[in-house]
Amino acid sequence: MTAVPDVLSSRGLAIRYSSPFDPIAEPLLRELDEEYLDRYGPNDEMRRHPAAEFVAPGGAFLLVLDRGLAVAGGAFRRYDDATAEFKRVWTHRPYRRTGLASAVLRELEAEAARRGYRRIYLTTGPRQPEAVALYHRTGYRRLADQADPAYDDELAFEKLLAPIPGGAAAVRPAGAR
């Protein structure tokens, strides 16, 4: 377990780094896949990247647990030498609008910085206005026409991680150079 942000510890929730292969993650990943199907129809989003990309050393897979049940989570994979790509950011419906998604982003950003990444890249779809609002609210900058051209409905975002003394990095707002 890692240090738990206040929004989580005040609710008795815990963060655990795991893997997409962990059985405790299966219901959360299944619900995310169902949400994509409901919003976009048949798609391959959950199969576009092998699960092995979301484990160390290049990736990470985070779960937020409530009494041992996964209620939120997120992951990243290596996009390039300096960039982590966030994927699978998700909150179980009864836990939405409670700050968990923001806490997941902050923790993933901190872990990416600890791993030496200097930039976060992520995409979301146009039928996920909650995600677009979350990324804007948490300092991500929309990138025009930067998403994978094979998936023209994607909206791409970035956030820069600033170097700090000692070789680590700290999150800074996108656009701050």
Image: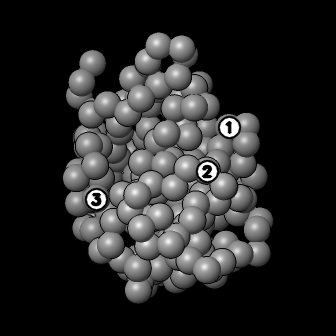
**Which residue is found at the position 42% from the left and 48% from the top?**
106
* Pointer 3 or 2: first along the chain: 2
Q: Which residue is mark 1?
A: 58
Distance Cα–Cα, label 1 vs label 2: 18 Å
Instruction: Name the kind of residue labelled 1 in the image.
Output: Gly
Give the image's coloring scheme.
one colour
**Dot 2 crowding, Cα within 10 Å, few <14, some 14–19, many 20+:** few
**Of residues 54 and 69, which is closer to you in this image?**
69
Is residue 37 depicted above or below 9 in this figure? below
- Position of the C terminus by quadrant: top left
Query: Does residue 166 appear left or right of residue 17 in this picture?
Result: left
User: What type is the residue that disc 3 sits on?
Assistant: Leu
Residue 121 position, x and y percent, is: 43, 41
Q: Position of residue 77 (x, y in %)?
A: 61, 44
Residue that carries the numbered disc 2 in the rendered image: 2
Which of pointers 1 and 2 lies earlier in the amino acid sequence? 2
Dot 2 amino acid type? Thr
Mark toward the start of the polypeptide (1 vs 3)? 1
Q: Where does label 3 land, which residue?
A: 134
Residue neighbourhood size for the residue with mark 3, other residues' Cα within 10 Å, grouped as few (<14), some (14–19), many (≥20): some
What residue do we see at 27% from left, 34% from top?
Answer: 173
Q: Secondary structure at mark 2?
A: loop
Mark 3 vs mark 2, CA separation in Å: 23 Å
